Amino acid sequence: MNRALVHRDSIAEVLLTDLIRLGETQLLVAAQWPRSHRVYRPDHEGRHDPMLILESIRQTGLAVSHFAFDVGFDQQSVMRDVSFVLDQRCEPRALRSATNIAITVDCRDLIMRTGRLRGMTIELSFAADGLPFATGRGTVRWISAQSYAALRARSGIRLNWEELRWRNAIPARRASSVRAAEDVLLSPETRPGSRRRLVVPLDHPVYFDHPLDHAPGMLIIDAAWQAVTEQRGDGARLIGCMLDCSAFTELGPETDIVLRRISSDTTEFVVQQRGRDTASGFLRTAP
């Protein structure tokens, strides 16, 4: 798989291996989840980190756009929302080998302008060894580089990557229940109530596989998940989530994640920056 199709620089971060077109808006995508990963490691029972589902959705939306709809590499992608549901009873294990995944993809709500794809929603079904174990959904929008630059200029933020790297120096922290210390995305400082300060590690080889001008959705969801596991303190496992991005989460300003537990298994979260919400969603857990 050409890593450019999934917008990754590192070959090691490419999960997809092949795409086959089944119809005008249906595709079959092959993926392989590794036995180990720099961040998303299997647990002691061999169960894959559910964040691999989200990364597979992200990569699929990009690859399908380029492969099936001829979206040019000069276009800029914006992931509007992403979600998944995992059935723990059927999920594969990574005990002795990598796991080969078959992903059935339906492309819906296509937005076409002058014969070009400008947006769509993908619905995905994940299976391993012929057994379905998860479903997912994501919405991607495509805009020209010029339109993207104009959109980002409205934020009024001028990025100085070297200055940002210095300002985002990561404070001392300990490992969480789901991540090693070097992958913790939350500051150890105490915040009032169910509020945690986001740490953005610009030098991280996975969250920032390549330089970005905003905090990526994968980082936001992972940070929210880390905050939830810390709040719960019971070793619960992620089995479903939804992220909706209403605005870009910028790299410079201080950013908080605010949690609100709405049931025994579901916690809502809001990402706040400069007094406004930039993203929101929920995380669902199981023992």
Image (cartoon, rainbow, N blue to C red):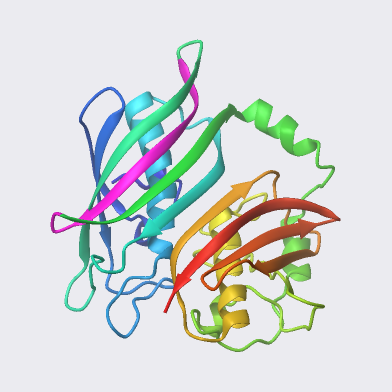
Q: Is residue 239 visible?
A: yes
Query: What residue is rendered at 81% in x and 42% in y?
Result: 155
What's drawn in magenta, residue-wise? 116-130
Q: Position of residue 208 (x, y in %)?
A: 56, 60
Q: Position of residue 64 (x, y in %)?
A: 36, 35
Residue drawn at the location 31% of the way across and 26% of the way down: 25
Picture layout, residue 178 above or below residue 30: below
- Please tell me whether the stretch drawn in magenta is mainly helix, strand or loop: strand
Which of the pair 26/219 is nearer the observer?
26
Give the quadrant of the C terminus. bottom left
Horizontal side, residue 23 vs residue 4: left or right: left
The extreme front residue here reads 263
Q: Is residue 54 magenta?
A: no
Residue 215 position, x and y percent, is: 65, 55
Judged left or right of residue 62, residue 141 is right
**Where is residue 179 shown, x and y percent of the image?**
50, 79
How many numbered dots are placed on residues in this image? 0
